[in-house]
Image (tube, rainbow, N blue to C red):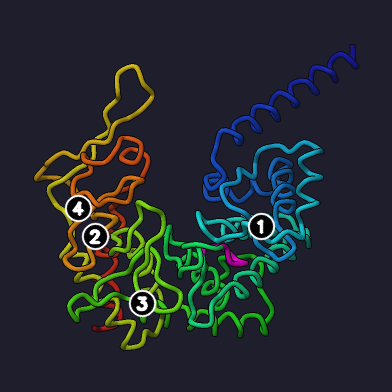
């Protein structure tokens, strides 16, 4: 009878463990990092995921993107990852890769003092420093991948994410539980300042007036540059927002930083759309949710992701790279499968007043 009861308890524990793991598997990788309670990072489930994160990291310190790190790995898959350790292809900071894995390891180390977590975080930190261009920008992939990937990449907040990691460590905010050495922090301070300088120099002048930024800038000229066929050189309502939020965190901003922020905020005010909302409508006999833009005088402000360099006119592209001036004019695949509008600058405008007041501008 005693063994029977033990067996029942074991089955219940296994079922609870399975339910929890199944729940974790339903979440996306960034959600697990950002939404989990601090104590969760001490659990066996978190430790199992951490083993995957360590396996996916390459010897150079970076990670590939779009990996659901929480998914269980077979022994064959683990051996393949071990064999790839010295491979330097497809390592990136795009889509939050590398910086989000570093955050996860920091949260793990805060709960479990496993030196492997600390060493992997520090290797990631060194990777970020190595990947920087001499002009202060960062490419999308490092080592470099041929094509538009070599441009200085603000796309999907890649460079802003890197600079925020460096700044948090240099400023010793405690946001990361792992702190690089003083020698490394000195290098990080230089890298951060160079990054800010690159941002200042790449802010686009429209008819002599400073405005915002493109999602990517030529790594030599720092001028706006094309990426994919539907991502043409333009002023970005989305990527520019995180850049300005980053600039506003600088404690003693230079006159150049102050001018950059003020100019960008003026541009955000000028380009906001106040009479349009995005609706999603189910397509009959399909899993597709059609995207429809509806005129609404009471709509919350929106900004186009792509605006003409000459006059800020919003535009949209299909995979043929031909500009259209209405989202309805492009094919359904790109229309519903891409973020053409954003409300992110709203956060900039919200924080701008307090930023000016704090510094008596």
Distance from Cα at disc 3 to Cα at disc 4: 26 Å
| Residue 357 rendering spot, x and y as whole percentages | 25, 77
Q: Residue at x 9, y 45 (%)?
A: 297
Q: Secondary structure at mark 2?
A: loop
Frontmost of labels 1 and 4 is: 4
Mark 4 falls on what kind of element?
A: loop
Instruction: Please give the name of the residue rendered at 70% of the width and 56% of the height, measured from the top-left corner.
Output: 57
Q: Would residue 318 be found to the left or right of residue 116 on screen?
A: left
Residue furthest out toward the top: 1
| Residue at the image point whose x is 76% and y is 57% from the top | 85
Q: Which circle's residue, 3 or 4, is located before the other in the chain?
A: 3
**Quadrant where the image shows the N terminus:** top right
Q: Which residue is mark 1?
A: 105
Picture quadrant where residue 131 is located: bottom right
Looking at the picture, tell me which residue is in the foreground, 260 or 290.
290
Q: Position of residue 23 (x, y in %)?
A: 59, 32
Which callout, 2 or 4, points to the residue nearer the camera?
2
> Which stretch is magenta?
140-145
> Mark 2 sits on what residue?
307
Q: Is residue 85 above or below residue 193?
A: above
- Residue holding disc 4: 301
Q: Mark 4 packing: few (<14 Cα in 10 Å), some, or many (20+)?
A: some
C-beta proximity under 8 Å, tags 1 and 3:
no
Q: Secondary structure at mark 3?
A: helix
Quarter of the image with the C terminus is: bottom left
Classify 10 Å Cα crowding around label 1: few (below 14), some (14-19), many (20 and above): many
Residue placed under numbered mark 3 in the picture? 202
Q: Nearer the viewer, residue 233 or 250?
A: 233
Instruction: Name the chief secondary structure element in magenta.
Output: loop
């Amino acid at each position: 009878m005693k063994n029977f009861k033990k067996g029942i308890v074991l089955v219940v524990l296994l079922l609870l463990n399975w339910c929890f793991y199944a729940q974790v598997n339903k979440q996306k990788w960034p959600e697990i990092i950002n939404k989990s309670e601090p104590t969760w990072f001490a659990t066996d489930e978190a430790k199992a995921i951490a083993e995957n994160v360590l396996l996916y990291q390459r010897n150079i310190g970076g990670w590939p993107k779009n990996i659901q790190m929480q998914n269980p790995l077979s022994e064959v898959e683990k051996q393949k990852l071990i064999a790839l350790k010295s491979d330097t292809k497809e390592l990136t900071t795009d889509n939050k890769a590398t910086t989000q894995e570093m955050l996860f390891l920091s949260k793990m180390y805060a709960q479990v003092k496993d030196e492997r977590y600390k060493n992997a975080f520090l290797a990631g930190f060194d990777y970020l420093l190595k990947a920087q261009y001499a002009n202060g920008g960062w490419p999308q992939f490092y080592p470099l991948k041929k094509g538009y990937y070599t441009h200085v990449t603000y796309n999907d907040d890649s460079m802003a994410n890197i600079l925020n990691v460096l700044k948090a460590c240099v400023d010793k905010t405690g946001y990361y539980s792992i702190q690089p050495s003083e020698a490394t922090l000195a290098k990080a301070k230089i890298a951060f300042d160079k990054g800010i300088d690159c941002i200042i120099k790449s802010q686009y002048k429209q008819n002599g007036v400073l405005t915002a930024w493109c999602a990517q800038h030529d790594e030599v000229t720092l001028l706006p540059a094309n990426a994919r066929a539907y991502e043409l050189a333009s002023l970005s309502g989305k990527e520019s927002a995180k850049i300005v939020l980053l600039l506003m965190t600088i404690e003693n901003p230079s006159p150049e930083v102050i001018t950059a922020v003020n100019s960008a905020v003026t541009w955000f005010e000028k380009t906001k759309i106040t009479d349009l909302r995005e609706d999603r409508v189910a397509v009959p006999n399909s899993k597709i949710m059609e995207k429809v833009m509806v005129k609404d005088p009471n709509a919350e402000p929106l900004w186009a992701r792509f605006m003409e360099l000459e006059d800020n006119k919003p535009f949209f592209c299909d995979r043929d790279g031909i500009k259209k001036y209405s989202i309805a004019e492009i094919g359904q695949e790109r229309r519903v499968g891409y973020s053409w509008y954003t409300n992110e600058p709203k956060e900039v405008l919200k924080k701008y007043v307090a930023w000016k007041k704090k510094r008596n501008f």
